[in-house]
Amino acid sequence: MGFLKAVKDFFKFTGEQTGLPARHLEGLEGVLYNTRVGLLTDTENRHVALTIHHPLKKGDEVRILPFDQIAGVDFVTWEKTFRRARSPFSEGLAGGVIGGDTMAVISAMDAVGRTRIEDVKVDFAVQIRYHPKGDLRTVRRIVVGDVVKSTAKNWADTLCWHAGLTRARFIEPERTPRGPTYL
């Protein structure tokens, strides 16, 4: 019950509106990876309102994407590799637990300047392709994930219907061929 109340409060539904709570993966400038984003389709005003909840700022930021700028909606498998700096504190803590004080100092010094690679894969993400304002030749995309499939499909169908777009489809990732590639 608490989840449904939180969704209703987050979106403040009125009239012909449908919402989709999600996490930002990529495409919104100035918004960090995995930031909470709400997508609200307002059919009366013919736009999608993206409500961004910044974890460090007070209040939410709202960005508007008019239906006439949207080129399409798809479901995709999203993959990205992140390089993150190793934390000397956590490395020193782990080294200290395993090998004592000397190992803690050595582990912390060793972690400075080193990075770790983190592969992230989201099997079901919503991709919104759109034209930036005033530029019909360029197509950009906003990708959000951490969505419930049935809710995302209903939201996408509603958006596509009211925006006059073809129905959302699932785009399979391209398989990398094994072995040599012939030209």
Image (cartoon, rainbow, N blue to C red):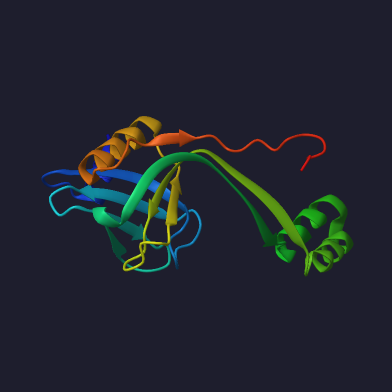
Give the x, y percent position of residue 120.
61, 46
Residue furthest to the front in view is 183
Work out whether residue 60 can be spotted.
Answer: yes
Left or right: 84, with 37 as reference point: right
| Quadrant in which the N terminus appears | top left
To which quarter of the image does residue 16 belong? top left
Give the x, y percent position of residue 32.
49, 61
Badge count: 0
Closer to us: 130 or 83: 130
Work out whether residue 48 can be spotted.
Answer: no
Left or right: 86, with 95 as reference point: left
Q: Is residue 4 above or below residue 129?
A: above
Closer to us: 7 or 73: 73
Residue depicted at x 86% and y 57%: 100
To which quarter of the image does residue 47 belong? bottom left
Q: In this view, does 128 lie above or below 136?
A: above
Left or right: 145, with 153 as reference point: right
| Quadrant in which the C terminus appears | top right
Give the x, y percent position of residue 180.
82, 38
Residue furthest to the top in view is 150
Residue depicted at x 74% and y 65%: 88
Q: Is residue 172 above or below residue 33?
A: above
Left or right: 36, with 163 as reference point: right
To which quarter of the image does residue 58 belong? bottom left
Closer to us: 85 or 133: 133
Residue depicted at x 30% and y 65%: 59
